[in-house]
Image (cartoon, grey):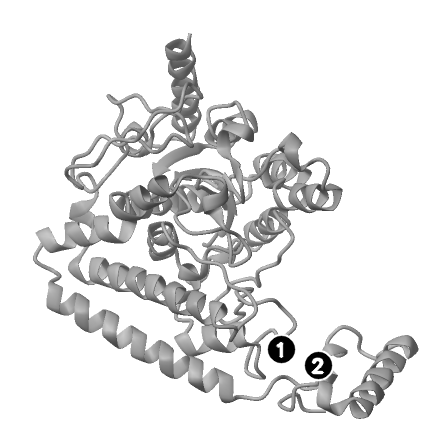
Amino acid sequence: MASSYLSKSKHMIMQSLKSKKVLMSIIMRHTSFVTNSQFCRPFHIQNYADSSVALSRSFGSIYCERRLHTATSVSNKITKELAVNMYTNMVTLQVMDTIFYEAQRQGRISFYLTTIGEEAINIASAAALNINDFIFPQYREPGVLLWRGFSLQEFANQVFGNKYDYGKGRQMPIHYGSKKLNYITVASTVATQIPHAVGAAYSMKMDKQYSCTVTYFGDGGSSTVNYKLINNFIFVIFLFILLKTLLQGDFHAALNFAAVMEAPVIFFCRNNGWAISTPINDQLRSDGIVVRGKAYGVPSIRVDGNDALAVYSAVNDARKMAIEQQTPVLIEALTYRAGHHSTSDDSTKYRPVDEIEWWRADQNPVTRFRKWIETKGWWSDETESEHRSNIRKQLSQAIQAAERVEKPPVADMFNDVYDVPPKNLSEQEALLRKTIKKHIHEYQSDVPM
């Protein structure tokens, strides 16, 4: 029965893409179908350029005769300049995550969230896009912003919330945004960016722009919670709010609206196996996320999210299809969140350490891509060491500079919303200033009054 279901699922998705006049070779290069059968331990990849990949017991088993697209079919499209640029950005993202994470542990910033294990998704997808494409991120896509030219100093200014932070210190760390780079500011609320991306794409369609929008989101959450947590009602409510990405109205309404209005938007799902502590098999019983696109009439494709070349090729094809055929496209990238959900999480409490370490080692997308560019003669140990050392120095300087800069003024807590502040807001500002003046030693000295 499972085999029959997979065959039917494969046929439906291929027919959907075929109806949009996409070459069948694209599907064969990028698609692999996941079952919900008994979990199996992944087997190791022997050769990056030609490998049968099983993703994780978090995803269920993958039929071994199916192959996720790797370097073979797109390697000729990738120039040395592009490949090296992609790799150096992946390494930069990896080093940045490590250093900022350590800074949080030292108490220098309040919060941080890494992209460990998802560097290929970040950088390779960004490399396949155009600067005129608007990005509607979740919160695990800083690499897209890095690729577009956001400097390490700008990242540091944001996480330290100083006066040079574009959000004026109003957001939590890692809630980046850049009007210049067409990167919409991150919001903590889960999935709200998805319908926003559809609306923006429809606007582009009406203006006849040769561009699209891209919205990133996780595999989402579950409609159920572990019964052991029921006694902690507040935690249950908090968890439910955070984990409902794909089961709440935003995702479904957005896909349906995009399909009906034929909006040029790319829905990019980072299926990393975990919604905080909830594994994917506790969230859904369907064949992953890719089949949901089919249900709404959206051409959909699944890729190996740890293969930078596969991600690049899929997004490149999806962008062309979205713009030229004026249609939404759903991409499901299978990967693994190799880090904790955030600095507020300890993932070893709900998943085995050896599983995490296996993904950090054998399936590390940075290592996999490095092996490929080394076979091309485009990279070496010396270049690697020099680049990592250089990025660490730049980050150290950026952090020190960000820490020395004063915080945004108190007035920034109350402006930019109303043209003329209402009376109650003015009263609140006056009260706050009075309180600070009265208890001056209780407040940071680097916050201008």
Foreground pick, 447 / 206: 447
At a point 15% along the width and 39% down the height, the residue shown is 47
Foreground pick, 348 / 361: 348
Vertical position of residue 224 compared to residue 91: above or below: above
At a point 64% along the width and 84% down the height, the residue shown is 408
Foreground pick, 353 / 414: 353
Vertical position of residue 370 compared to residue 10: above or below: below
Whole-percent x and y of residue 260?
61, 34
Whole-percent x and y of residue 27?
32, 30
Residue 17 falls in which quadrant of the image?
A: top left
Q: How many marks?
A: 2
Residue 23 falls in which quadrant of the image?
A: top left
Whole-percent x and y of residue 143?
40, 60
Q: Which residue is mark 1?
A: 168
The residue carrying pointer 1 sits among few (fewer than 14), some (14 to 19) or many (20 or more) residues within 10 Å by Cα, namely some
Say whether residue 102 is left or right of residue 55.
right
- Can residue 327 be seen in this snapshot? no
Q: Which residue is mark 2?
A: 412
Instruction: Give the Cα separation between the discs numbered 1 and 2.
Output: 7 Å
